[in-house]
Image: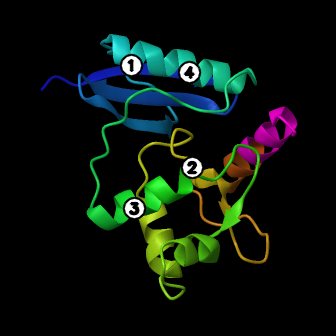
Amino acid sequence: MEIYCQYYKSPLGFIEIQGSETGIASLIFVENPLQTESTHPIVEECIQEIDEYFRGIRQNFTVKLDLQTSEFQTRVLNTISEIPFGTTASYSDIANLLGNSKIVRAVASALAKNKLAILIPCHRVIGKNQKLTGYAWGIWRKEWLIKHEQQYRIKG
């Protein structure tokens, strides 16, 4: 299966997007984009949706995803995907939603392996004390994304 890769220059730096006919497998922040890019309609659709997100006109993503994760990580990622735009939940909230309050560290570990930044909003998960903790691409990006979403959140 061929993998396609493109870069998007966001307000937070370059984002590398990789996908195939199956869906988007990776959306991560990178310091320097590689020189080579290859395009596919699903990657172009993702770039359009990410651009709309950063412009404040998209709150939900519809691009098809290709989750390449364990069963547990998939459960965690599906759970955090339900956190509404512009809001946050704690790691312990997620553990409780998964039915076991003692798996907070396992939840954090699963989120640390998330390769679909923004599309699966691990930036919306914060510490129980409301502190911003644990974001693979930097706490400053997590803080920016949360404020961005709160600014554009549809109240109602």
Residue 109 spot, x, y in % from top left: 44, 70
User: Going by the image, does 30 lie left or right of 149?
Assistant: left
Q: Residue at x 55, y 28 (%)?
A: 14
- The residue labelled by disc 3 is 75
Amino acid under label 3? Arg
Prevailing SS of the magenta stretch: helix
Amino acid under label 4? Glu
Residue 59 spot, x, y in % from top left: 67, 32
- The residue labelled by disc 1 is 43
Q: Nearer the viewer, mark 3 or mark 1?
A: 3
Amino acid under label 2? Trp
Rounded to the nearest angstrom, the CA distance separating label 4 from label 2 is 20 Å
Q: Is residue 94 visible?
A: yes
- Which dot marks residue 49? 4
Q: For the residue labelled by badge 1, is the local secondary structure a helix, a strand or a loop?
A: helix
Vertical placement of residue 111 versus 48, above or below? below
Q: For the residue labelled by badge 2, is the local secondary structure a helix, a strand or a loop?
A: loop
Give the magenta part as a residue range. Answer: 145-156
Rounded to the nearest angstrom, the CA distance separating label 3 from label 1 is 24 Å
- The quadrant holding residue 40 is top left
Rounded to the nearest angstrom, the CA distance separating label 3 from label 4 is 24 Å
Q: Earlier in the sequence, mark 2 or mark 3?
A: 3
Q: For the residue labelled by badge 3, is the local secondary structure a helix, a strand or a loop?
A: helix
